[in-house]
Image (tube, rainbow, N blue to C red):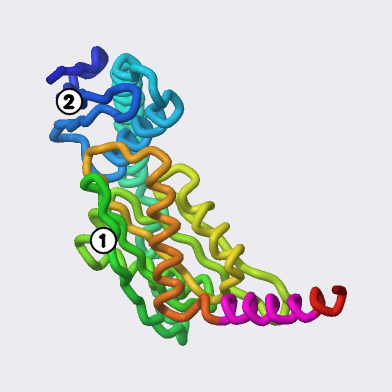
Amino acid sequence: MADIINPENEEDLQAQIILPPDYPSAAPPIYQINAAWLRGSERAKLANSLEDIYVEHAGESILYLWVERIRDFLVEKSHCSEAVVQQEEVNRTAEEEVEDDEDAPDFSILGVEKAHLFMDQPNDEEMPPVKHGSPITDRRSTFQPHLAPVVTPRQVKMVLEKLYENKKIASATHNIYAYRIYCEDKHSFLQDCEDDGETAAGGRVLHLLQILDVRNVMVVVSRWYGGILLGPDRFKHINNCARNILMEEGYLASTDEACKSGAKTKRPKGKKAK
């Protein structure tokens, strides 16, 4: 176990690293990071950067690179914390100046009125049904897909909000998603994706949706990191999760039938040529 201390703000972090017998040729180190202040997106960001180092230097010793990356992470965090404190001081000073000025307008009232206008806007969007697929577990990491039919960007937001109401999904290390919506009036697609800290994962899911030519659907893949680096295998599991739930919910039926019919039309042509 190693204690890594940030020299700028004395925030320490404990990293316990176990080297398996086939390290570094065929297996990455197994590690556990302990820090009371490290949680949520920050922990996911650090874990993802360590995994990227392993992928880039597969088969090489990476302990030194990991230690340096953790030190850099601590320094970056201290700089961000200082910036937040400075901004809070600026905001507090500005608030005090407004309170001292009797002629200053009451911005809080304006804010309430503005929020009230948004609340009065009609909301005819229906919450799409959300389906949950079977999980895939590999080396203590678990991947689970979720799917919902969507036809507007607002429904995409509604689905995400619904998923995050689930404490287990909200606590996932990454919630990667992609969606494709077909706009009939423009004969084009509205599509987007989100990595949520898992670099390039959202783009891979979106690429899968494009290859399968599915439309009006959103796929989310949750990953709970188990402490063991998976390397490129993590992308395989993410794509398999997405494809499996698309198949389970019938989104690949039309594609498969089209492929079969296309194959049937090609065979007779080949026979005629003979």
- Dividing the picture into quadrants, the one containing residue 254 is bottom right
Instruction: Specify which label sits upstream in the sequence, 2 or 1.
Output: 2
Image vertical order of residue 99 relative to residue 9, above or below: below
Residue 169's disc is 1
Can you give x and y, in whole percent of width and height, for residue 268 in the image? 77, 81
Viewer-closest of 14 and 145 = 145
- Dividing the picture into quadrants, the one containing residue 92 is top left
Bounds of the magenta span?
254-268
Residue at x-position 22% and y-position 19%: 9
Amino acid carrying label 1: it is Ile
Q: Residues within 10 Å of mark 1 (few under 14, many from 20)?
A: some
* Residue 261 covered by magenta stretch: yes
Residue 96 in sight from this viewpoint = no
Q: Which residue is mark 2?
A: 18
* Residue 267 covered by magenta stretch: yes
Q: Quadrant of the C terminus?
A: bottom right
Viewer-closest of 2 and 256 = 256
Marks counted in the figure total 2
Can you give x and y, in whole percent of width and height, for residue 113 in the image? 41, 70
Amino acid carrying label 2: it is Ile
Residue at x-position 53% and y-position 52%: 203
Can you give x and y, in whole percent of width and height, for residue 111 in the image? 40, 63
Q: Quadrant of the N terminus?
A: top left
Image vertical order of residue 90 relative to residue 128, above or below: above
